[in-house]
Image: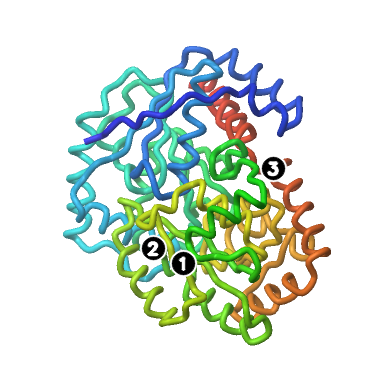
Amino acid sequence: MLQEVHVGHKSLADYQSVVVKPLMEEIKELADSLRGKRVLHINATSFGGGVAEILYTLVPLMRDVGLDTDWRVIMAPQEFYETTKVMHNALQGNPVSLNPVQRETFEEQSRIASESLGGGFDFIVVHDPQPLLLRHFSGDLGANWIWRCHIDTSSPNQSLARYMLPFIELYDTAVFSMEQYVFSGLNIPTRVFMPAIDPLSTKNMALSPEDADYVVSQFGVDAGPPVMLQVSRFDPWKDPLGVIDAYRIVKKEFASVKLALVGSMATDDPEGWSFFTSTVEHAGDDGDVLILSNLNNVGNLEVNAFQSRADVIVQKSIREGFGLTVSEALWKIKPTVGGNVGGIPSQIKDGETGYLVDSVEQCAERCMWILDHPEESRAMGRAGKEHVRAHFLMPRLLRDYLRLFSEIGQAS
């Protein structure tokens, strides 16, 4: 089935102080031509992932500018999410694809979910592979269908790609975060636009150093010692084990350094539990390594506090569709060390807004440089904040969707 997600109210006018005036004017002009259009977003979870974070802001902003916008999540048994996790990993290059039983599970649960979809929408935006088959089972319902892929699909498992391609081609348009993610052989129109963060959300609003120190002190982090931080799901693609290894190298030079690994457990990520355990085991009994999640009452405010308190923030991904946590870190004027993969290089300009790395040793080396050069690092952080302001804030993403709706609405 599909379950509605309820969101609060947001006003586009509140963002006037953080984005440029021409962007706000373009949004208003586009929205005026789309006023009253019905939009539905569908994804797999309402918490614990970047897509959900985006939709909690994007949906109310679409409503605020005059579009009748809803958000639903696909609800299914655990084996469905285990299957779609296999798909997610395979799209990022894992050699293991779906077996016949998993295909049957994926298709049958998608068919069941499609029965509660209903009609009356002008635009239906389906996010990532989990709800992909809704278009196949529902027909077009008189709507323009958009498949929005947030995953790094630059080198997908070819068996899975061949399976998915006919279903993707039922859509009117497919949207990817990077040009290199567009499926080879895809015969429908495509667009490329990147995700964005909400600068006014609890996770990204300005916190004073005193407030940040107070919050992280509740988790045993004192005001003095330097802190390394990675915020991400507990997922092998995020390489938290590699971050721990880098921290151990850094600790040889900075004996008081602490490492915080902060993540969240999402309903559509059944592997997260086992990899969380693997991460804890890899850290061993080192009391200077904190491994925290929403199960420890770490919510958006706490993530903000850790990011604001950290001396160096890491996103050492092996594969990464975009990596919203990088923009979050840069927005807080923090020099950031990221894996040289996926959408991270779009955010981190190597040597200007942070550093890109390809190994544990490089990660450790760059972290030590940042800890050893606080003034230069802060200048790097300021450059990073302005880069995010120009490219990765939510009003720009709203504008991109409005442009897309306007273009495909006129063409249909």
Q: Residue at x 34, y 63 (%)?
A: 272
Name which residue type carries label 2: Asn
* Pointer 3 residue: 391
Q: Position of residue 167 (x, y in %)?
A: 34, 44
- Which quarter of the rendering shows the N terminus? top left
Alpha carbon distance from label 1 to label 3: 25 Å
The dot on residue 237 is: 1
Q: Secondary structure at mark 1?
A: helix
Q: Position of residue 348 (x, y in %)?
A: 69, 58
Q: If you read the primary sequence from the N terminus, does the residue marked by circle 2 or circle 1 appear first?
A: 2
Tags 2 and 1 touching, CB below 8 Å: yes
Q: Position of residue 28 (x, y in %)?
A: 65, 18
Displayed quadrant of residue 229:
bottom right
Q: Residue at x 55, y 55 (%)?
A: 323
Name which residue type carries label 3: His
Alpha carbon distance from label 2 to label 1: 9 Å
Name which residue type carries label 1: Trp
Between residue 57 and residue 258, name the one nearer to us. Answer: 258
Q: If you read the primary sequence from the N terminus, does the residue marked by circle 3 or circle 2 appear first?
A: 2
Q: List the single residue furthest toward the bottom.
A: 252
* Pointer 2 residue: 89
